[in-house]
Structures are given as C-alpha cells and as structure tokens.
Image: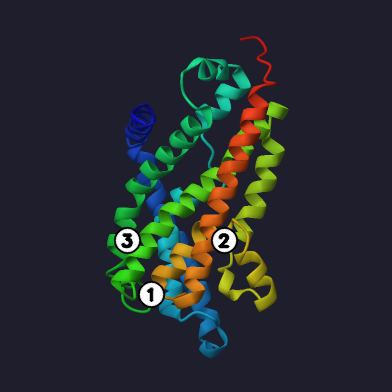
Amino acid sequence: MKKYFTFFKIRFQSTLQYRTAAWAGVATQFVWGGMRILMFMAFYEADKSRFPMEFTELSSYIWLQQAFLALFAVWTFDSEIIESITSGSVANDLLRPMDVYTMWFTKDMASRMAKALLRCVPVIAITSFLPKPYGLSLPKSFEAFLLFLITLFLGVAVLVSMGMYIYILTMKFMSAMGVRILFTNIAEFLAGSIIPLPFMPDGIRFFLEMLPFASAGNLPLRIYSGNISGNEMWFYIAVQIFWLLFLQVTGRIWLKSKMKKVVVQGG
C-alpha cells in the first residue's frame, strides 16, 4: 500500500506546480458558470413552478460543477499513461512488483485531485459571497455535507474506473482517439454536465440516473444542493457503489487478460 501512496504523492505534487494553468482555468470557470446561471434565469423568469429544481439549488449545482470541474472532466486522461502504452514503455510497468491497474488508477486520481484543489478553493470562496439566488448556498444539513464529500470521492473513483477502460482499449488499438472522442461526447451529456439530469423527462431521467455516468458528478452535487434526499438518495448511493465495484472488478479482469497478450513494439 505504501508504494501506491508514494505514486499518488509524486503525481499530486507534480500536478500542483501548474498554478498558472489553474488560475486561467478558474477565470474561465467563473465566466462559464455565470453565463449558464444567467441563461437558466431567463427561463425561470417565465414560470419558476415548471422547473424541477429551485433556482438556489440550480445555482449551487452549477458553481460546484465548475469548482470540481477538474475532478469530473470526462475528456481528461493521464497523458503519461497514454504515452507509456503507445511508446512501449508500459513494459517497465510490467517489470515493477506492483499491480498495474492500481498504479494507473492511483496516478489518475492524484492528478485529478491536485488540479481540483488548485481551482475549487477560489471558486467556492468567491461564489459563496454572491447574492442569492445567484451564489453558492450552504448545504441543507451537516449530514448532507458529509454525504456530499463521501459521494464526491466515490464519484471520482467511478469516473476514473470508466477511464481505465479507455487505457485498456489503447493497449488494444494503440490509438484510442476515436473511442476517447465518442466516450467524451456521450459521457458529457449522460452525466448532466450540459443539462442537469433533473430537467430530463421522468422516464428518460430515471434511465440516465441508473447509468454509471450519473453516479460520477451528478449525485454528489444534487445531494449538496438538497435536490435529492431521503430514501431516493440512499438508493442512488447504492447504485453508485454498485457501479464502482462492477467497473473495478471487470476492469481488473480485462486488464489482466490484456497483459497476458501484450506485444511491445520498438521498445
């Protein structure tokens, strides 16, 4: 376990060095978040009763989405892992007395968490002082905040577990660019990054909420904002845990199978 923590620490610290890129990202997220809130406000002014989320809940949802964008950016993959696969240096990973899946998973998690740490603090701090209903509100309760943190971590683990499939496909095709583009476009929509899932028609919404994409960023943000609670919340937390276990088990089995057949060219 100590060796995986070391990999996590090294990747986390190296990612923290990119502060300029982080501040540029923060500025972009403020502008994009503000534009989305103003866009939704134009619709809400017509008839607020027709929408499934209160505007204060929606504002919190959008600002948290921007604050933790680096955690749930479905288009983000670890470039070092991709490079090691395509260049053949993945052979070095096979020689280490370590589980390759756990090592890659740890690196990806560390990179996302470090990027999020650099960006989330200023976004949360500033939007918390914006006037209602445009700013980030406090969670409904301490329990909601605690469950938000737990499901936030589980959600990132679900997303990284899905990303592991892309790395495995890269081993198969040597270039999974087409798969990555397809995955990114589908996941962005199904995870509620473009349109929050509560705005979907009931039948379609329930189907989307049962998919692993909704278990990533959608669930923790709705718990924080208070849009989901009670038995419904516990049901979707169980769904989130199911997808994490399923993706972890199947991903490890698939990677182990691919490692037995891996061919390194030009290494």
Q: Nearer the viewer, mark 2 or mark 1?
A: 2
- Where residue 122 appears, as percent x and y from the top left, is 30, 55
Residue 227 can be seen, yes or no: no
Query: Which tag, 1 or 3, sits closer to the chain's start?
Result: 3
In the visual, does 21 lie left or right of 85? Answer: left
- Where residue 85 appears, as percent x and y from the top left, is 60, 24
Residue 29 or residue 249, whichever sits in front? 249
Q: Nearer the viewer, mark 1 or mark 3?
A: 3
Write down the residue under mark 3: 124
Element marked by disc 2: helix
Q: Amino acid at mark 1?
A: Tyr
Write down the residue under mark 1: 134
In the visual, does 130 lie left or right of 84? Answer: left
Residue 50 to residue 86: above or below: below
- Residue 214's label in the rendered image is 2
Q: Nearer the viewer, mark 3 or mark 2?
A: 2
Q: Amino acid at mark 2?
A: Ala
Task: Residue at 68% x, 29% y: name it.
Answer: 175
| Residue 208 placement: quadrant | bottom right
- Where residue 190 appears, as percent x and y from the top left, is 63, 60
Element marked by disc 1: loop
Query: Which tag, 2 or 1, sits closer to the chain's start?
Result: 1
Residue density around tag 2, few if under 14, some if 14–19, many if 20 or more, within 10 Å = many
Element marked by disc 3: helix
- Where residue 16 appears, as percent x and y from the top left, is 33, 37
Residue 125 to residue 87: above or below: below
Q: Quadrant of the C terminus?
A: top right
